[in-house]
Image: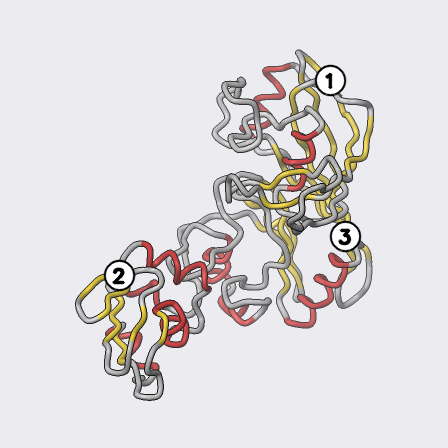
């Protein structure tokens, strides 16, 4: 293989003699180790990797002397998120060690390659480029946890590896208190606990599902324990505004749990009822309202809050929901 510098310029690699037969995805990952398997598989599906002037396909094998060429935007090969100075994200709290951002709906927390844009990581690379080395992967830029793209609200950022490890440990020990507000269909109980484990939905890779009955299938299903608590703030016109606390942190947990007990979130395109009223929302009504944690350096308790976005406030105003 050629050295790293020509990679960025040409996106071209020659299979060396010691690799007599190698799969396309394996060799592409060897050439571009900073890219995730997900990003590489996506590029292969989009026919961006070519083998000897022919578009590569999943499962293709290369032999010594074959030429692999990347034919896509050059910035997709970059080893870190692109800086986006135009992206505006409110900084709710900041000191020398940590930051808390108020993520708008429609903005992803981070991507998995340099092709991903409009993420908090792109914002942080523009505002705090020194965070590029903080996190479990180069794409996180200090981001300690994630929110779904259409969920707004608070996201915690570490400015050093020590702070990142400390906050991640607090998350794993369930010491960080995360409060969300959700507008759901139905008259919910005054309070409740949902503890169904979650698993990937084999019929739709975008979805998770709640395992509400014991597994009687022969094939074991990978499951994640999950616990969600809720308290009703008010109700009106067949809707309930809930304060939700998520003790665990499984993908789509609140959305799946509430839908499983008959209270899908308003305007949730993935887990809501088809054809249900959206009240003009282009995102679901779920907002990360507050975070409470111990400061990784001083150990003092910090609580940060984020007001509802104007679009969600307007829905509550229209419904005359007060509490």
273, above or below 291, in the image: above
Please state if 20 lies on the left or on the right of 187 as rendered.
left
Please state if 5 lies on the left or on the right of 33 as rendered.
left
Residue 244 image point, x, y percent: 74, 36
Seen at 52% across and 43% down, the residue is: 149
Task: Tell me the CA gap for discs 1 and 3.
Answer: 29 Å
Q: Earlier in the sequence, mark 3 or mark 2?
A: 2
Q: Earlier in the sequence, mark 2 or mark 1?
A: 2
Residue under label 1: 187
Please state if 124 lies on the left or on the right of 261 as rendered.
left
User: For residue 176, which numbered disc appears in the image?
Assistant: 3
Q: Earlier in the sequence, mark 1 or mark 3?
A: 3
Q: Residues within 10 Å of mark 3 (few under 14, many from 20)?
A: many
SS class, disc 1: loop
Residue under label 2: 72
Which quadrant is home to the C terminus? top right
What is the number of callouts on the image?
Answer: 3
């Amino acid at each position: 293989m050629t050295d790293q510098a020509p990679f960025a310029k040409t996106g071209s690699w020659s299979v060396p003699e010691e690799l007599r037969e190698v799969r396309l995805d394996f060799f592409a990952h060897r050439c571009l180790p900073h890219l995730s398997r997900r990003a590489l598989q996506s590029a292969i599906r989009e026919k961006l990797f070519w083998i000897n002037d022919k578009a590569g396909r999943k499962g293709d094998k290369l032999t010594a002397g074959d030429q692999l060429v990347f034919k896509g935007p050059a910035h997709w090969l970059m080893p870190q998120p692109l800086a986006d100075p135009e992206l505006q994200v409110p900084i709710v709290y900041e000191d020398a060690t940590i930051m808390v951002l108020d993520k708008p709906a429609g903005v992803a927390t981070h991507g998995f390659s340099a092709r991903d844009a409009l993420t908090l990581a792109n914002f942080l690379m523009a505002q705090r480029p020194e965070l590029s080395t903080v996190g479990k992967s180069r794409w996180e830029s200090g981001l300690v946890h994630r929110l779904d793209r259409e969920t707004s609200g608070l996201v915690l950022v570490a400015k050093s590896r020590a702070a990142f490890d400390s906050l991640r440990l607090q998350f794993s020990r369930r010491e960080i208190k995360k409060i969300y507000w959700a507008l759901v269909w139905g008259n919910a109980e005054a309070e409740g606990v949902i503890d169904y484990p979650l698993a990937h939905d084999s019929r739709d890779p975008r979805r998770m599902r709640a395992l509400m009955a014991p597994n009687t299938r022969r094939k074991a299903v990978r499951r994640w324990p999950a616990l969600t608590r809720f308290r009703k703030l008010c109700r009106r016109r067949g809707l309930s505004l809930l304060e939700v606390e998520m003790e665990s942190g499984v993908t789509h947990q609140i959305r799946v749990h509430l839908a499983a007990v008959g209270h899908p979130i308003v305007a949730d395109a993935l887990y809501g009822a088809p054809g249900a009223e959206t009240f003009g929302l282009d995102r679901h009504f779920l907002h990360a309202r507050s975070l409470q944690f111990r400061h990784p350096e001083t150990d003092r308790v910090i609580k940060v809050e984020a007001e509802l976005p104007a679009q969600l406030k307007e829905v509550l105003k229209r419904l005359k929901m007060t509490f």
